Amino acid sequence: MTDPTVEEELRLRRELAAVYRLVAHFRMTDLIFTHISLRLPGPDHHFLINPYGLLFEEITASNLVKIDLDGNAVDPTPHRVNPAGFVIHSAIHKARSDAQCVLHTHSRSGCAVAAQSDGLLPLNQISMEFYNRVAYHDYEGVALNLDEQKRLVDDLGTHPVMMLRNHGLLTVGSSAAQAFLRMYYLDKACQIQVEAQAGGSAVVLPDPTVCEYTARQLNGETDESDYQDDDAYDLAWAALLRLLERVAPDYRD
């Protein structure tokens, strides 16, 4: 008889491995130096994270490392874990029950906007998904200090995304799929902002009331049905998995 716990872990491993491959495919990586984690079900507070030293394009379901909230490997593994990955991710998983997946990047545009005093601006419909929904955390050095965890969690609060100032981007989600899609569009919003500012002309900001209304539409917080988050994300995620089956089907191994 198949153990449902084992089957569920395999499903989650494949989902997280898919996110790693998609981050690589869309060029949001920083060699081996960022991380994505996914909480496993159960009372033990275990989560999956990348083996330190592998490129994201090398990540598979089977080589993800299972660790506890203290950063200890749960199962035998030849790999170790990025210490900064443990500091950031364990703090958020411990504090936010809804943060099943935590995704962190150092993309070029994300780092550029994270270094701007005004942060993310509502310059385009894509960025308006995050209007008044972005947290900010001031830079304190490489995230190796456990004392930073409380400040990081306090700054994140209940927000779905955060800009780590002078550092990069972070998203959380109720699934790996949701965390990835939030990152995909947060990063795209940053790209649009950098390119708009490079144009040399003054940028146009919509009325704040319109921005908030659009954010509510895009987050499924209105009575309208066209932009319901669950439906849109499910359709997009299915399309992304079809993409991976064409370009990197070994993520499932």
Image (cartoon, rainbow, N blue to C red):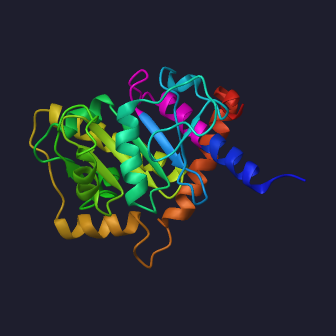
Residue 188 appearing in the image: no
Q: Quadrant of residue 5?
A: bottom right
Q: Residue furthest right?
A: 1
Q: Quadrant of residue 14?
A: top right
Indicate yes or no whether the magenta region holds residue 49.
no
Q: Residue at x 29, y 70 (%)?
A: 213
Residue 190 appearing in the image: yes
Give percent across and percent down for residue 43. 58, 60
Residue span colored magenta: 16-34
| Number of marks drawn | 0
Question: In the depicted view, which residue is nearer to us: 11 or 212?
Answer: 11
Q: Residue at x 46, y 47 (%)?
A: 69
Give percent across and percent down for residue 31. 42, 20
Question: In the depicted view, which residue is nearer to us: 150 or 107?
Answer: 150
Q: Residue furthest bottom?
A: 223
Give percent across and percent down for residue 51. 52, 28
Question: Is 220 on the left-hand or right-hand side of 44?
Answer: left
Give percent across and percent down for residue 148. 23, 45
- Is 234 located above or below residue 147 in the figure? below
Question: Is 189 on the left-hand or right-hand side of 165?
Answer: right
State which quarter of the image contains the C terminus.
Answer: top right
Q: Residue at x 56, y 55 (%)?
A: 44
- Is 136 located above or below residue 78 in the figure? below
Q: Residue at x 10, y 38 (%)?
A: 201
Question: In the depicted view, which residue is nearer to us: 38 or 125?
Answer: 38
Question: Is 153 on the left-hand or right-hand side of 245?
Answer: left
Indicate yes or no whether the magenta region holds residue 19.
yes
Q: Quadrant of residue 217?
A: bottom left
